[in-house]
Image (cartoon, rainbow, N blue to C red):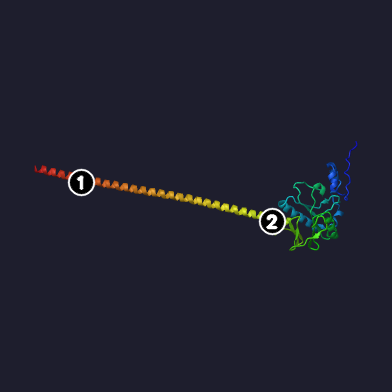
Amino acid sequence: MTLSIPPLAPARSKDAVAPTQAAWDRMTPAEREAAVASLPSWVDIEECGAVEGEEHQEARRIVGETLRPHFAEADPSMYVTGEMGVFFPGEPRVIPDLFAVPGVAPGGGKRASWIVTREGRRPEWFLEVTIYGERDKDLRDHVVRYAELGVREYFIADLLRRKILAYRLNDPLVRIYTPVLAQGGRYRSEVLGLDVALEDGKVRFYDGDRRLLDPDERVEALRDALNDELMLRQDAEERAADEERARHDAEQARRDAEQARRDAEQARRDAEQARHDAERRATDEERARHDAEQRAADAAAELARMRELIERLQRG
């Protein structure tokens, strides 16, 4: 039996160049799919420069996980990601640590790379984190390269020197960066609409006077908010229980007062009945006394009459 094995996908060179905008515009949909498929989506270890370890990875993670939740609320059309190849028209890819693209419709799905001609949007903000690796590449070469690509702003977090470097294209036709000057230790990003600073070895972002929380701080804030909510709920439940007890006690007091009123009313009726009974007994006694006196008077009169009769008989 002969097994049929599907052919492997054609090899994709890491040096492949993205189509120019003019070439892309001339392509059919199938040709565009083929052009995208020919571009590499993986990143070789040598393309990442020197491996800078956990400090470098942590700095990139914190920046991404600080910006994404902020823009999810403030501006969902701001696409923020990193560790992904970016293909500008007619250029081989670049791989910034992080980048931001304004005006991206939410819900575009997961991407393996950012191809400007396919997306119709170009990144306008790049960030590189540098510590011990190829510092000249970030601090010198990329300043020229990213300006030539038309990246509007390029920020460098130099964790070794504990400082931020920032550059901006003031004129998109003159692709030479101008340094962004710090104001109170912060560097303004017009693309992000945020101020950027390096504080305690961390890249920090400010929206006006409000500092954006990094992911760990956000978890802590959520934990505090949850604890506050639980305490408020517990207080509310305790207040409700106290109010229920007070209501129950008040209801019991009302019932007791009502019972006392009924008892008092019954006592009054009993007293009134007793008074009435006493008055009736007094009346009966008075009548009985009167009847007895009347009977005695009648008896005395009868006795007097009998004596008078006897006397007449004796005289006769």
In the picture as drawn, the residue positioned furthest to the top comes out as 1
Q: Nearer the viewer's eye, disc 1 or disc 2? A: 2
Residue 49 position in % (x across, y down): 85, 56
Q: Is residue 297 left or right of residue 237?
A: left
Q: Give me the C-alpha separation between circle 1 and circle 2.
A: 110 Å
Residue ID at (34%, 49%): 275
| Few, some or many residues within 10 Å of mark 1 (<14, 14–19, 20+) | few
Circle 1: residue type: Ala
* Residue 221, numbered label: 2
Quarter of the image where the N terminus is located: top right
Q: Earlier in the sequence, mark 1 or mark 2?
A: 2
Residue 141 position in % (x across, y down): 85, 58
Nearer-the-camera pick, 162 or 185: 185
* Residue 278, numbered label: none
Residue ID at (23%, 47%): 293
Residue 289 position in % (x across, y down): 26, 47
Quarter of the image where the C terminus is located: top left
Circle 2: residue type: Ala
> Label 1: which residue?
297
Residue ID at (60%, 54%): 235
